[in-house]
Amino acid sequence: MTQNKAVYSLPSVLADVPMHYCPGCQHGLAHRLVAECLEELGVAEKAICIGSIGCSVFIYNYLLVDTVEAPHGRAPAVATGVKRARPDNVVFTYQGDGDLASIGLAEILHCANRGERVTIVFVNNTVYGMTGGQMAPTTLLGQRTTTCPEGRCKEHEGQAIKMCEIVAGLGGTAYAARVALDTVKNVKQAKKAVHKAFEVQLEKKGLGFVEILSTCPTNWKMTPVQANKRISEEMIPYFPLGVFKDVTSAEDKG
Amino acid sequence: MRAIAFREDRCKGCLLCMTVCPKQIIIVSNRFNKAGYKVVEVLEKNVDKCTSCAACALVCPDNAIILGPRKRRKKGEVADAREA
């Protein structure tokens, strides 16, 4: 017996073009998860993506949705304006850690605190990828980058910022989760989290936030397979995976 | 349709698919694609071992893997009965 159905097909929201990312970079995978969720929720037609600065700056070439390109770090502020002007559209930002956790820290915190009905997809690879591997706020202690060649030092630079915990602590956040893309199981959980982050926006509960732990083999100076292992060996022990806030589950219980 | 095929122009040779394949049939070929990456392949004799579990397609960052229809096999059935 043969099922004449392909077991795996790409979402139509995702453009079928080669991506510019380095070999093993998981941005392509994160793009696909977002595209799949938009398609499954049936909101691709009314989705507006807010692009950010970083490697993912060309997201408008890969996701076939309307896109606004925000200044560095200001994607949550732009998303606020877009959502308030067009409340019926589904608005999401796609940001890296240099963009969201550093220059855009004020924007994301106030956006979450106001409880804007937007979705934030935050890809954390612990380094500034596009500009050549400088230290980011999320760089782990001891990690060598071009601006901390001896490794990040707690006394001088402090510890890595755990964005998901901070955003989960703010009043307007409806859903905050941290997921990883290193194993098949984690990718499936990542998709569920992205799905949920869009659902809370559609249900007008508040801000949906997903932190995706991803690799940067080029700037970590590792092979893609080594870099993938680093997620489970070094990143997950410091950045624990899980759902940090979910207002919908609290309603179910009480 | 072949159980598993690679779009070689998309493959960047990151080998993440190789690490997740439960049957360990994905290997590095000696071919380079246009972009200069060494692509992966599944040898013709191993194609029938593929169960179309889609683990490789799920982790491929560049969407380079095409999977054919999943074939349900009876216990003990010979694998090469797969449709061409």
Image (cartoon, rainbow, N blue to C red):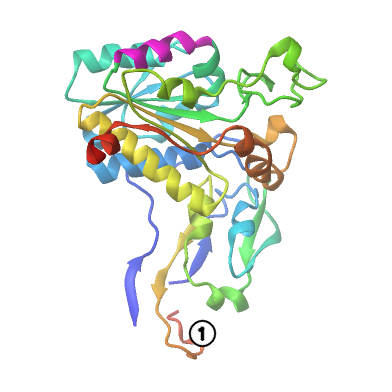
Residue A179 visible (yes or no) = yes
Q: Is residue B16 above or below residue B74?
A: above
Mark 1, other Cα within 10 Å: few <14 / some 14–19 / many ≥20: some
The residue at 49%/12% (across/down) is A105
Please state the horizontal and vertical placement of residue A209, each as a whole percent of the image.
Answer: 39, 28
Element marked by disc 1: helix
- The residue lying toward the viewer, choosing from A157 and B42, is A157
Which stretch appears magenta? Answer: A103-114
Q: Is residue B73 above or below residue A31?
A: below
Q: Is residue A78 left or right of residue A25?
A: left
The residue at 44%/47% (across/down) is A189
The residue at 45%/41% (across/down) is A17
Residue B66 included in the magenta stretch of the image = no
- Determine which residue is flagged by label 1: B79
Q: Is residue A85 above or below residue B3?
A: above
Q: Is residue A141 above or below residue B1?
A: above
Residue A112 included in the magenta stretch of the image = yes
- Dividing the picture into quadrants, the one containing residue A59 is top left
Residue A15 visible (yes or no) = no
- Is most of the magenta stretch helix, strand or loop? helix
Please state the horizontal and vertical placement of residue B43, each as a whole percent of the image.
Answer: 63, 71
- Count the labels in the image: 1
Q: Is residue A253 left or right of residue A179?
A: left
Furthest residue in direction left, as rendered: A88
- The residue lying toward the viewer, choosing from A224 and A158, is A158
The residue at 58%/20% (across/down) is A161
Which chain hosts label 1? B
Please state the horizontal and vertical placement of residue A85, each as a whole percent of the image.
Answer: 20, 13
Which quadrant is home to the C terminus of chain B?
bottom left
Circle 1: residue type: Ala
